[in-house]
Image (cartoon, rainbow, N blue to C red):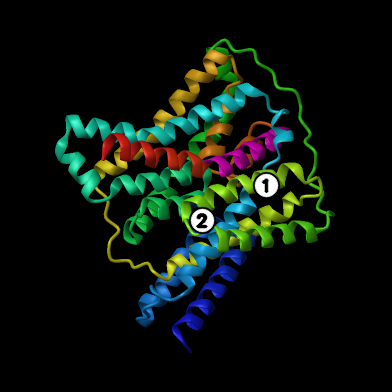
Amino acid sequence: MTPLIIGIVIVIGTVLIVKALGSSESKSITTILNWFPAILFAYVIPAGITHTFGLDLASIELHQWSKNIIMPLAILTVMSALSFSQLKHIGWRPIMTFFSGSMMIALMPIAIGLATKYIAPSVYDTFITEGYWQGMITMVGSWIGGSTSQLVLKELSDCSEELFITILVMDNVLVNLWTILMFQFIKRSDGWNSYFKIEDKVKDFVPDQVDIAKSPILTLSAIVLIIIASYFLIPNFLMKIIFLSIAGLLLGNFINSWNHALVLKIGGILIILIMAILGLKLNFENFGLPISMIILSIGWLISHYLIMILVAWKLKLHMAWLPIASMANVGGISTAPAVTAAYNEEWMPHAIILAILSMVTGTTWGMISIYLMKSLVL
């Protein structure tokens, strides 16, 4: 078989394994996945195969297909999943708190870069020359937008494969630890309300259910046509991402028969596919990060939460919104509802909407971070 065919077989097999792990009800597998998410296997399996059998699949055409077709397709599907009409049910205060957390995540790399530049030049040199600022940019995408934004920002920041996989592992460990903390915090939110003298009450909310009976033909046809048009008419990667982001929002909000459930499922599969293709280029030789980078990342998460506490206190917002907003930012569409259910299951739709909002804004925040980093720090 040719290298391309071998790569395709490995990628398809990896996607099937990851999907099977994600849907497994085995207690032992679930325990493992609590700390090593199924989607992370999309990187490890292809890398393990290529390393074991000495395969060089880093230059096959599949990688260009991923960047030029699959990734834009993932952006379009994820962006079209957001319905503006649902946001009014949440209200502006939780959204403001949520965005304050996003802003802190996006601006912290710039603050760290500026601080080290003038206070600790040696740390600054490592921060820049080793490319750690690029790794932090991918974390902005991961913590706000999830895997799709992280992959896009990896390309935009030109983060190396070795640093990216190291950041990914550290990121997953931090997020899992943070999720445990958020479970504890949301259970104690009533006590925090008393401490801050907040009497905010949130009405029960039953959102409009996504109509899974809608015909997928219009949705799929529109997606295919727009992807084809962007491929031939917009060669610049960044411009293509911006165009598809706007197009996705328009499709998801101005076409009444748009199938939001379908595009979310497609987007999820595409993310796994992109990661599996990227895994063909990875190796296990360099996973080292300085302890300073780890400490900065922990402080980064804490500062994100502290700014939300300040905003929620000023807005007299129910403190349960803080872990919900934090997990919508950092954890995403899977963990945000889970944490929310620990307080009130009827609030889970709020968490899902905020998580989707996070998914569709992560790339924008990351591009802002890149612009400010290049303008003020580099």
61 or 231: nearer the viewer? 231
Q: Secondary structure at mark 2?
A: loop
User: Residue sitting at 18 percent across and 29 percent down?
Assistant: 119
Q: CA distance from mark 1 to mark 2?
A: 23 Å
In this view, the residue farthest toward the top is 197
What's the residue type where badge 2 is placed? Pro
Task: Work out whether mark 1 precedes mark 2 in sequence or the reverse, and give the earlier one.
Answer: 2
What's the residue type where badge 1 is placed? Ala
User: Residue sitting at 59 percent across and 56 percent down?
Assistant: 74
Q: Which residue is mark 2?
A: 37
Residue 303 — which label? Answer: none
Q: Residues within 10 Å of mark 1 (few under 14, many from 20)?
A: many
Confirm or deny contact between disc 1 and disc 2 (CB under 8 A): no
Of circles 1 and 2, the one toward us is 1
Magenta region: which residues?
Answer: 346-361
Task: Please provide percent x and percent y for residue 372.
Answer: 36, 36
Image quadrant containing the C terminus: top left
Give the side of residue 287 with respect to residue 37, left or right. Answer: left
117 or 350: nearer the viewer? 117
Question: Was residue 143 drawn as part of the magenta stretch in this picture?
Answer: no
Residue 58 seen in this snapshot = yes
Q: Secondary structure at mark 1?
A: loop
Residue 198's place in the image compared with 372, above or below, is above
User: Residue sitting at 20 percent across and 34 percent down?
Assistant: 117
Give the side of residue 370 with respect to residue 234, left or right. Answer: left
User: Residue sitting at 62 percent across and 36 percent down?
Assistant: 354
Residue 189, quarter of the rendered image: top right
Q: Determine the main secondary structure of the stretch shown in magenta.
A: helix
Task: Please provide percent x and percent y for residue 263.
Answer: 69, 54
Q: Which residue is mark 1?
A: 81
In this view, the residue farthest toward the bottom is 1
Give the side of residue 322 with respect to residue 294, left or right. Answer: right
